[in-house]
Image (cartoon, rainbow, N blue to C red):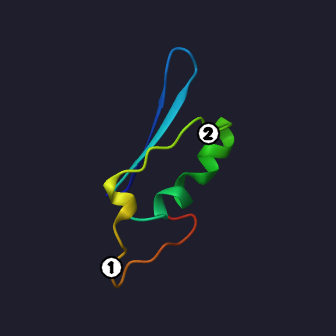
């Protein structure tokens, strides 16, 4: 299951966390949300980011 979780603190700071996305796919699916929320303060990459896509998986823009 692919999930994009957005958390907004009482101070208005936002955090975007993706789950179930492999490699750079997380950046593709969250790009528009990041742009809407403003300037990125920092980025923490998870182990999923460093995994490779397996045969049969593909990254398609607009698909979550």
Q: Secondary structure at mark 2?
A: loop
Above/below status of 52 relative to 35? below
Residue 36, x across and y down, in percent: 67, 41
Residue 9, x across and y down, in percent: 49, 20
* Residue at the (48%, 64%) spot, across then down: 24
| Crowd band around label 1 with a 10 angstrom C-alpha radius: few (<14), some (14–19), many (20+) | few
Q: Which residue is mark 2?
A: 40
* Residue at the (36%, 84%) spot, across then down: 56
Compared across the picture, whether 57 is left or right of 33 comes to left
| Crowd band around label 2 with a 10 angstrom C-alpha radius: few (<14), some (14–19), many (20+) | few
Nearer to us in this view, 39 or 59: 39
Given contact means CB atoms under 8 Å apart, are the residues at marks 1 and 2 in contact?
Answer: no
Q: Which residue is mark 1?
A: 54
* Residue at the (57%, 64%) spot, across then down: 62
Above/below status of 37 relative to 10? below
Sequence-first tag of 1 and 2: 2
Query: Which numbered tag is attached to residue 28?
Result: none
Residue 52, x across and y down, in percent: 36, 72
Say which of marks 1 and 2 sits in front: 2
Which image quarter holds the N terminus?
bottom left
Residue 46, x across and y down, in percent: 36, 51
Nearer to us in this view, 1 or 43: 43
Q: Secondary structure at mark 1?
A: loop
Q: How many marks?
A: 2
């Amino acid at each position: 299951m692919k999930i994009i979780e957005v958390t907004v603190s009482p101070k208005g700071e936002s955090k975007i966390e993706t789950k179930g996305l492999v490699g750079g796919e997380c950046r593709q699916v969250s790009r528009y949300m990041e742009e809407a929320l403003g300037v990125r303060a920092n980025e923490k990459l998870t182990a999923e980011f460093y995994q490779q896509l397996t045969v049969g998986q593909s990254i398609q823009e607009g698909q979550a």
